[in-house]
Image (spheres, grey):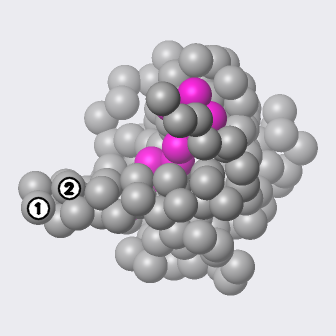
Amino acid sequence: MKFTKFTSATKSRWAKRVTATMLAIGMLFGLGLVAAPAANAANGGYCSKLIMNWGAGDKWWNTPADANLNELCRLDQGANSIAVKALQQGLNGACAVRAGLVVDGSFGPATRAALIRAQQKFGVTADGIYGPNTARAFWWTDGSGGCHRISV
């Protein structure tokens, strides 16, 4: 049996295959989830999708994204989408504030209050609006309890 050394190039090839596979599955089944893009530089629009982020050891976590897959997007009270579900999952995580929210995709007063607590914890303006500054500061919890930030 031959073993291949796991280098950054190997990881990059693997990530591209996973990205392509997840995107194909999402398109096939019309799911509202997408695989992560390579980079997000500019501020995005209104969050309407989610990105599934994959880490080492098959750890994953979801983050909100706009229609162009930009993670520096905006959500506020009144929003209702799969992106809100990603935010609610993040707020419920150990790396944020363990909010205990019902993950229903509806950004109501409880989600806003939890977001304000998270913004205070992360040291950004606590206005109850998920925007680029909050996105950069937010810590997401993966399935094994590890904490991650978006890479922008």
Question: Is 3 situated left or right of 102 in this image?
Answer: right
Q: Is residue 109 above or below residue 64?
A: above
Residue 60's spot in the image, x, y percent?
A: 51, 35
Q: Residue furthest bottom?
A: 42
Question: Is 10 situated left or right of 23 in this image?
Answer: right
Amino acid bearing label 2: Ile
- Is residue 55 rendered magenta in the image? yes
Residue 73 visible to the viewer: no
Residue 52's spot in the image, x, y percent?
A: 45, 48
Q: Residue furthest front?
A: 1
Q: Which mark is residue 25?
A: 2
Magenta residues: mostly which secondary structure? strand
Q: Is residue 39 above or below residue 31?
A: below
Q: Nearer the viewer, residue 140 or 56?
A: 56
Q: Nearer the viewer, residue 42 or 119?
A: 42
The residue tagged 1 is: 28
Quarter residue 122 falls in: top right
The answer to whether the residues at label 2 and label 1 have Cβ atoms under 8 Å apart is yes
Secondary structure category for the residue under label 1: helix
Residue 93's spot in the image, x, y percent?
A: 59, 24
Amino acid bearing label 1: Leu
Q: Residue furthest right?
A: 123
State the quadrant of the C terminus: bottom right
Residue extent of the magenta highlight: 49-58
Quarter residue 92 falls in: top right
Q: Which residue is pictured at 47% across the width and 71% down the height? A: 69
Residue 17 visible to the viewer: yes
